[in-house]
Amino acid sequence: MKQSQLFTRTVKELPKDEASYNAQALIRAGFVDKSAAGVYSFLPLGWKVINKIKEIICEEMVAIGGQEINMPSLAPRENWQATGRWDTLDVLFKTSGSDEKEYALNPTHEEVVTPLAKKFINSYRELPMAVFQIQNKFRNEKRAKSGLLRGREFLMKDLYSFHADQTDLDDYYEKAIVAYNNIFYRFGLGDRTYLTYASGGSFAKYSHEFQTLIEAGEDIIYVCDDCKMAVNKEIIADQDTCPKCGRKDLREEKATEAGNIFKLGTKYSEPFDLKYQDKNGEKKTVIMGCYGLGLSRSMAAIVEVCHDEKGIIWPESVAPFKVHLLSLNENETATKVYQDLLSAKIEVLYDDRDLSAGEKFADADLIGCPYRLVISKKSIQAGGFELKKRSEKDSEIITPETIVSKLS
RNA sequence: CGGGGUGUGGCCCAGUUGGUCUAAGGCGUCUGGUUUGGGACCAGAAGAUCGAGAGUUCGAAUCUCUCCACCCCGACCA
């Protein structure tokens, strides 16, 4: 992508209506735009990051047998009345049409996926089954806050699993934990994301959250350094003791809930009468699990963690571009390098604009691509191009011949 | 939902004891020129129903009332 043609431009001043770092940085660098409290557009750079995040999540969900689908954002009122949540879930956005045509904007999809599964699951032979989707969720939060960390419309992955019995759900749940760990590791958040005991679903004592340690987080968790696990403050009775190993001196940390997994049991299969026939021809209620993971929230968490005073430092796995190529009045040479990198399928943002060097450097730091490649008189005199990692101080001069292999 | 704060060109803001405000400045944008290793400079230009509505007044960005939006703290958060 040539930066001269990029839809967005960076801005110098902090947006006055954002106090959280993630929103300030993402807006200044042109990744997102806010249209209302807790409601954001993803712009070309931001959407590229989301797509990287998507890809990682999809791979890991497919690896545990998830099949990707896409369910509607609108659900008829009856679905939500069937589970009683039409009246009890206060974050539910409801359309205000005529009485017989009311809909909810889905904040989660049990009320959609369960009747859907009923159409296809009949036999024990079809179990277990798992489907997932990535789409916008709507929650009418009393107070949206912290930029992309808590929005009213946000991107989430939700997977639902269907099982013949509790043991099978338990096994699958463990696999999901492994998949989630892989995902956060690949986001570059592995070392600061903890499997966390949280208040349970209806059939389990606990649910589990994946809490990422960030200063801006709204949750307080207690980390056990022996178990590499944590406990959410909301459930812990004795704040000094790990429920798993009994360790006493837990570390209090601020964190954000990037994922949450639940053993639903029959909470939703019962009201929708989701049953299967077992080997003996007996009808039994399907056991369910659900597994959520916020994409936009994860993106915000990454930004909260990966930055310095100049801007974002994207982990390579989710960076909008791998390389930011800066031409300092050497567009002829730079354009050739740009073409070479494109041919080698290296993702590159090419700053071909007619601007001062300082402005280009500042933009590159703000946008935060992992590698910065500078082509200038100075670099050419030194024997090639200057390559610098965003995360490091020092640069090296590399020769034109080695550039593609170096960045592949 | 309770408390606090803010609202002025695309962005950041000055101006708020009512009166050359016919709304200042910076950033950005456009035109021309000079520049080019850390947001460089000169000259010119476009761009604003001062959040909305009602009111007080000879006169309102400025005072009063109502509403709206956004931010922060708290409560809430399958």
Image (spheres, coloured by chain):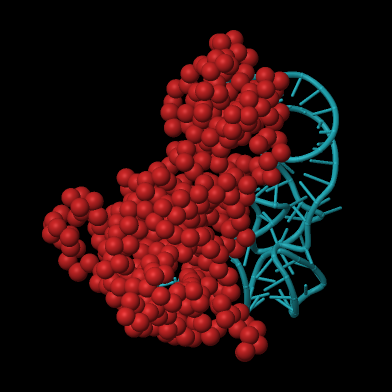
Residue appearing at x 28%, y 72% in the figure: A166
Residue A20 position, x and y percent, is: 47, 53
- Asked if A169 appears above or below A322 in the picture, the reply is below
Question: Is A391 on the left-hand or right-hand side of A40?
Answer: left
Q: Is residue A110 left or right of residue A400?
A: left
Residue A55 visible from this viewpoint: yes
| Residue at the image point whose x is 50% and y is 23% from the top | A406
Of residue A365 and residue A125, the one placed in the foreground of this image is A125
Expressed as whole percent of the image width and height from the top left, the position of residue A146 reads 47, 58
Horizontal arrangement in the rendering, residue B60 relative to residue A143 (left or right)? right
At 32% across and 62% down in the image, what residue appears? A173
> Which chain can be seen in red?
A
Q: Which chain did the image draw in cyan?
A: B
- Residue A306 rendering spot, x and y as whole percentages: 43, 42
Where is residue A127, by image quadrant?
bottom left
- Say above or below: A315 vs A93: above
Rendered residue at 29%/59% (across/down): A174
User: In x, y percent, where is residue A217?
Assistant: 38, 56
Q: Is residue A291 left or right of residue B49?
A: left
Locate the N terminus of chain A and report the quarter of the image it occupies: top right
